[in-house]
Image (cartoon, rainbow, N blue to C red):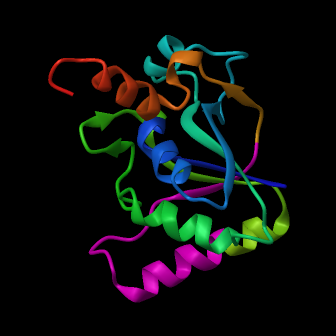
């Protein structure tokens, strides 16, 4: 099994996109890249811990390539936007690929270069590529959030 760690805005949406891929074994959301030890959601939302909301993806590289993991990543957020995704703003929402080995590092830069050369976006990709850091798992209520709210809506008179 292999890990991929990605940040691209609110971790709920990023995680949801990977949860539906049958080749993905597991996902978990959390905080990484900052200086505060064991931050909470409230700490990270202040925007001064240096952490980003991120998703750690466990996958089998025999079934899905890291390139496909990255292709999905670039298709579900705006990699040309600095510290903003949709209505979410702040440094905790920046676009970052956290690599776990030199192959991931190389593939991340190759994907960014190809995206920039493709002229798919009007602006250059600002996604950062950083070495994976300590990953602090987010609070339980954030884990698999979309599954939780889906269950909640099934229990309402209108769902």
Q: For residue 104, which quarter of the picture?
A: bottom right
Q: Position of residue 2 (x, y in %)?
A: 81, 56
Q: Looking at the picture, tell me which residue is in the foreground, 123 or 98.
A: 98
Q: For residue 80, which quarter of the picture?
A: bottom left
Magenta run includes residue 129: yes
Residue at image position (60%, 59%) is 22
Residue at image position (45%, 61%) is 126
Q: Quadrant of the N terminus?
A: bottom right
Residue at image position (47%, 52%) is 17
> Relative to 122, is 104 on the left or the right?
right
> Relative to 15, is 134 on the left or the right?
right
Q: Is 116 above or below relative to 17?
A: below
Q: Is 86 above or below relative to 152?
A: below
> Relative to 132, is 112 on the left or the right?
left
Q: Is 79 above or below relative to 46?
A: below
Please, which residue is most extreme toward the bottom here? 118
Residue at image position (17%, 18%) is 157
Q: Looking at the picture, tell me which residue is in the foreground, 145 or 77.
A: 145
Q: Position of residue 130 (x, y in %)?
A: 69, 52
Q: Position of residue 110 (x, y in %)?
A: 63, 79
Which residues are the magenta region?
108-132
Q: Quadrant of the C terminus?
A: top left
- Count the marks: 0
Q: Position of residue 11 (x, y in %)?
A: 48, 37
Q: Is 124 above or below relative to 80?
A: below
> Relative to 71, is 10 on the left or the right?
left
């Amino acid at each position: 099994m292999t890990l991929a760690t990605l940040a691209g805005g609110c971790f709920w949406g990023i995680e949801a996109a990977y949860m539906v891929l049958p080749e993905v074994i597991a996902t978990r959301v959390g905080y990484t890249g900052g200086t505060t030890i064991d931050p909470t959601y409230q700490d990270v939302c202040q925007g001064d811990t240096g952490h980003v909301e991120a998703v750690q993806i466990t996958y089998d590289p025999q079934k899905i390539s890291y390139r496909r993991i990255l292709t999905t990543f670039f298709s579900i957020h705006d990699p040309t936007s600095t510290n903003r995704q949709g209505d979410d703003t702040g440094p905790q929402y920046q676009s970052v690929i956290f690599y776990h080995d030199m192959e991931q590092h190389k593939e991340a830069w190759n994907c960014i270069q190809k995206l920039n050369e493709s002229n798919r976006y009007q602006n250059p990709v600002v996604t950062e590529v950083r070495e994976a850091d300590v990953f602090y798992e987010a609070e339980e209520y954030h884990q698999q959030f979309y599954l939780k709210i889906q269950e909640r809506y099934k229990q309402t008179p209108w769902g």
